[in-house]
Image: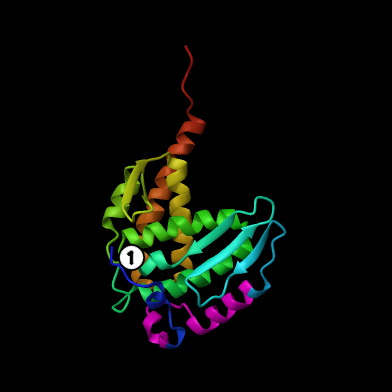
């Protein structure tokens, strides 16, 4: 992992050009403005806002009853790579806009799980540039996680967990709406359909008792 100071990882939104995200219909100016409004108006009786400035690399909340911190850390999205070069900068903006939307649609704890799934997928696929290995692992019911040291860990999980992982990732990809990712989305949806079909077989064709 590349070591660099946290200050060097901050995103300068003024340097993000609209054409950087021109491959899809993501409207960067509109969606950043909408995300900032959502974060400003965000309210949840169970948590308090500590720091949720859109431009910052870490959004912090505190649970009111346990006083534990809830963190959404964007630094790990671009820290393992050379942030000055290519795809992670626009994707980071898309991720922030998507997360702001999720925070206002569901509970912060569900949003945190969705964020973790999407973050792992982005890092493992080198920001969606190499998706084949992820697809292979999902076919094998293997889920990818990243430990505190930055290493990938694979574990065999249930089909329901795989289905949820894919649902969160495709939700993000639908929000991004990049035409170059249609094939990847179709492959993910194929796995979802397979899981659903297998579950239907289990429901409608239970084991006979003799």
Q: Is residue 111 above or below residue 177?
A: above
Span colored in magenta: 15-39
Q: Which residue is mark 1?
A: 128
Q: Is residue 32 magenta?
A: yes
Q: Main secondary structure of the magenta part?
A: helix
Q: Residue furthest top?
A: 210
Residue 180 position in % (x across, y down): 34, 71
Tell whether 46 sits left or right of 146: right
Q: Residue at x 43, y 79 (%)?
A: 11
List x then y, in percent, for residue 4. 33, 71
Is 89 contained in the magenta span? no
Please name the residue shown 64% across and 66% down the image.
49
Q: Give the vertical position of 137 relative to 130 (above or below).
A: above
Closer to the camera in the image, 9 or 37? 9
User: Quarter holding the N terminus?
Assistant: bottom left
Q: Residues within 10 Å of mark 1 (few under 14, many from 20)?
A: some
Q: Is residue 196 visible?
A: no
What residue is shown at x 60% (from left), y 58% (from top)? 108
Q: Nearer the viewer, residue 174 or 152?
A: 152
Position of residue 89 in the picture relative to residue 45 (left or right): left
Q: Position of residue 58 (x, y in %)?
A: 50, 68
């Amino acid at each position: 992992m590349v070591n660099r100071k946290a200050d060097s990882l901050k995103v300068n939104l003024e340097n993000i050009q609209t054409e950087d995200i021109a491959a899809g219909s993501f409207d960067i100016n509109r969606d950043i403005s909408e995300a900032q409004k959502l974060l400003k108006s965000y309210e949840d009786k169970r948590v308090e806002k500590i720091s949720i400035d859109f431009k910052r690399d870490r959004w912090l909340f505190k649970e009111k009853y346990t006083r534990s911190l809830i963190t959404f850390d964007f630094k790990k999205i671009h820290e393992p790579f050379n942030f000055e070069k290519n795809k992670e900068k626009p994707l980071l903006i898309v991720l922030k806009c998507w997360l702001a939307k999720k925070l206002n649609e569901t509970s912060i704890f569900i949003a945190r799980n969705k964020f973790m799934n999407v973050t792992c997928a982005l890092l493992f696929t080198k920001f969606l540039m190499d998706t084949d290995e992820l697809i292979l692992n999902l076919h094998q019911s293997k889920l990818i996680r990243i430990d505190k040291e930055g290493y990938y860990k694979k574990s065999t999980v249930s089909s329901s967990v795989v289905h949820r992982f894919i649902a969160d990732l495709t939700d993000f990809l639908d929000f991004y709406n990049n035409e170059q990712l249609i094939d990847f989305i179709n492959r993910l949806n194929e796995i979802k359909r397979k899981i659903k079909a297998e579950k239907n077989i289990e429901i409608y064709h239970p084991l006979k008792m003799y």
